Amino acid sequence: MYEKLLTLEEVREVLNTSSAQVYALVRSGALPAMKMGGRGQWRVEKSRLDEYIERAHTETATWVKKNPMARADTEVDA
């Protein structure tokens, strides 16, 4: 059975971001999507969105480990 194909608006709601950001993710290939129909409307498989979210979590965790916050005793008070 097929899973629901999400519109970019539905993806925007899930990610709680702007329409422009979702479009940029799709156009860059970071979030796999497909165009369909005569007007070329974008659709995203829910499983692809789930994979994107999981990948973003993993990449962020890696970044955080490589870029720890400065120790409190070395921070400069503003």
Image (cartoon, helix red, strand yellow):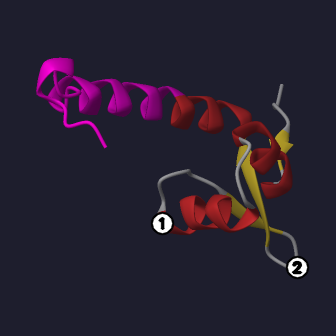
Q: Mark 2 or 1, which is nearer the eye?
A: 1
Quadrant of the rendering where the N terminus is positioned? top right
Tell me the element at label 1.
helix
The amino acid pointed to by label 1 is Ser
Relative horizontal placement of residue 46, taking residue 4 as reference (left or right): left
* Start-end of magenta stretch: 54-78
Relative horizontal placement of residue 35, taking residue 64 as reference (left or right): right
Q: Residue at x 72, y 59 (%)?
A: 18
Which residue ends up furthest to the front in the rendered image?
78
**Relative to 71, is 8 above or below?**
below
Q: Which of these two is toward me, 16 or 43?
A: 16
Quadrant of the rendering where the C terminus is positioned? top left
The x, y position of residue 6, in whole percent, is 82, 45
Do labels 2 and 1 touch, CB within 8 Å? no
In the rendered image, residue 71 lying in the magenta stretch gets the answer yes
Location of residue 9 (image quadrant):
bottom right
The amino acid pointed to by label 2 is Gly
In the rendered image, residue 52 lying in the magenta stretch gets the answer no
Q: Residue at x 26, y 36 (%)?
A: 77
The x, y position of residue 28, in whole percent, is 48, 66
**Relative to 31, is 50 above or below?**
above
Q: Which of these two is toward me, 59 or 40?
A: 59
Tell me the element at label 2.
loop
Q: Residues within 10 Å of mark 2 (few under 14, many from 20)?
A: few
Residue that numbered label 2 is attached to: 38
The x, y position of residue 40, in whole percent, is 80, 75
Q: Which mark is residue 28?
A: 1
Q: Residues within 10 Å of mark 1 (few under 14, many from 20)?
A: few
